[in-house]
Image: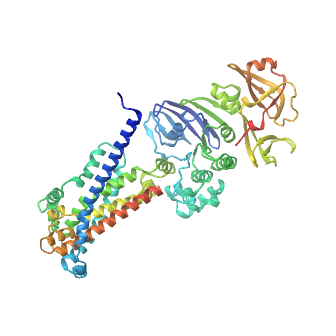
Amino acid sequence: MSLSVSVHGSTPFAFAAEFDVERGSTLALVGESGAGKTTILRCIAGLHKPERGRITCDGTTWSDSERRAFEPPHRRSVAVTFPNGALFGRMTAIENAAFGLRASGWRAREAMSRALEALEVTGAAHLAARRADSLSSGETQRVALARAIALRPAALLLDEPLSSVDVRARPALRSALIAAIKDSASATVLVTHDPADAMLLSERLAVVEAGIVVQRGTSAELRRAPATAYVAAFAGVNLFSGVARAESDGTSTVRLAGQSDEEGLVVMGAWSGPVAVVVEPDAVTVSREQTSTSARNRFTGPVESMIPDGGVVRVAIASDPPIIARITARSATALALEPGALVHATFKAGEARVS
Amino acid sequence: MSPSTEDIRKGALIRDRLLAVAAVIFAAAFGGFIALPLAALLIHVPVSAVGSMMQRSIVVDALRLSFETTLASAVLIVLGGTPLAALLARTFKGRDALASLATLPLVLPPVVAGLGLLLAFGRSGLLGRFLDLFGMHVPFSIAAVVLAQTFVAAPLYVIAARSAFERTDRDQLDAAATLRASPAYAFWRITLPAALPALCAGLAMAAARGLGEFGATITFAGNLPGVTQTMPLAAYVAAQSDMDAAVTISVVLACVAYGALLGSGALANLGRRTR
């Protein structure tokens, strides 16, 4: 039970991708905007016809250039969410969620009750009677997600589900996505340009550059042996998941798993609830001595590895949790860094991006 | 000596002012040219006699006939024109040739349209000879009036509907397709509701054109009072002998057409807003 994709084409530009996704698991198709992620997704949906290749799902052939087979989108057990939601504006949220079921011949009553279940999964049940064109972007995505999973598709394709959503609404929407992905038990393909979304929502990543999948693997695998500079930068981002608590001084404390109430990262802005904290390796400073005792965003541990990258070095530190710093080769020399050396890594609260 | 920048600026100012004045004068003259005949009609309305005029059989019969035939042709135009417009909104080989053909009656002299209809549906016409076998005689009947109006007015609806269908949100159609909607189901649930205001606007235009149909009707359906004499034909006949009746009918026609245009414009705006 899986989705198997192998596509090649030259329109609208050259692209090539090969990957498998098991039912119940998620693959993130990542890359910069314009890299061709959406084209690959559209091939799976049947909205774009690849020149060569084969797509099968649960043993059914969706497209096969050799046998000249091509199933149109409406005959594939697939569901897609679009970056802007693409809801049907004149219909209510529940009519949107029931659309696919009605199109496949379900009776109105059964379709509505299944649609309501789906809206409950994505936390949008209270919006059921609202007209779709009156919803906020976050609400729109929840309804679009419900509309997709209501069909229980074999393949669930999510195209930038968080990109149009306000940063404040992201953590909650991400939880809804996790719930929807779990509920659908589909082979899920997530298109995103955001490392945090890719790592939090999927088990494996496929990195697309200029239309071509350059590397596949877990984020840990990509971090360990990145094939390109882009992969290194994408997978090398420091990502911490925790629960935020707003403080009175305009900052928040994010307690990570296993930390006590007194510990936790300090970030700017008032946040509460589960959040992801992203810190670019460039923003992390490394020192041998414990310089400022007041810095709470401090990680202490031995250097695990040092990967040179031009004039800079990516230093992986085996602290708890681990962190990666990107410093100049000159500083690395000055600090006499070498694997096993005990170091302190810090970053300013303002450098941490909460999402 | 070359002109100073001040002189150049002044020259441009005068030129622009002249352009603006000329534009206003020409626009006003043209607007007057359009409004004058309508004003002349309104001035000549026999105000005191309108009541009795509206009871004359030539007026009453023509009103009733025009109303019935326009309604019937509107139904035919919607039933046939909607799928035709949907077809033309897709891309296929020969689409432009077909689209031009569907628009042709709009620019064809109505007499030519009437002749064509006569040669197609007449007793010895292409289709008419078979209809004759079943005892059906289309020319010079109320059916001929309806067919003439449909033939001449349909393009206005088809053009409006096609452009509305082409404006359908591509993302929504993609979403519908990935939600198990066949092209036909997506058309019914997504394209058609979105296009509805534009369809109504197009239909109002077509109905107004059908109501004013003259040339094709008189050629194909004749001019039989009470049977095929619609309002434009009645106005033409009355103009020879009974100017008051002719003016009354004409003003009614102009008012209905003006109302249809206003309604059509309002609907078109509504369509753009809710899209």
User: Residue A155: x percent and y percent?
Assistant: 57, 44
Q: Quadrant of the C terminus of chain A?
A: top right
Q: Can the viewer see residue B71?
A: no
Picture quadrant of residue A20: top right
Question: In the current view of this chain or complex, which residue is farthest to the front?
Answer: B1
Q: Does A188 sit left or right of A257 as displayed?
A: left
Using the image, determine if residue A284 lies above or below residue A260: above
Q: Position of residue A176 (x, y in %)?
A: 67, 50
Q: Residue at x 82, y 32 (%)?
A: A299
Q: Quadrant of the N terminus of chain A?
A: top right
Q: Residue at x 51, y 43 (%)?
A: A45
On the question of residue A205 being in view, the answer is yes
Q: Residue at x 15, y 70 (%)?
A: B239
Q: Where residue B36 appears, x then y in whole percent?
A: 24, 63
Closer-to-camera residue (A350/B193): A350
A323, above or below A142, in the image? above
Query: Looking at the picture, does residue B190 appear above or below residue A227?
Result: below
In the image shown, does B212 or A18 lie closer to the viewer? B212
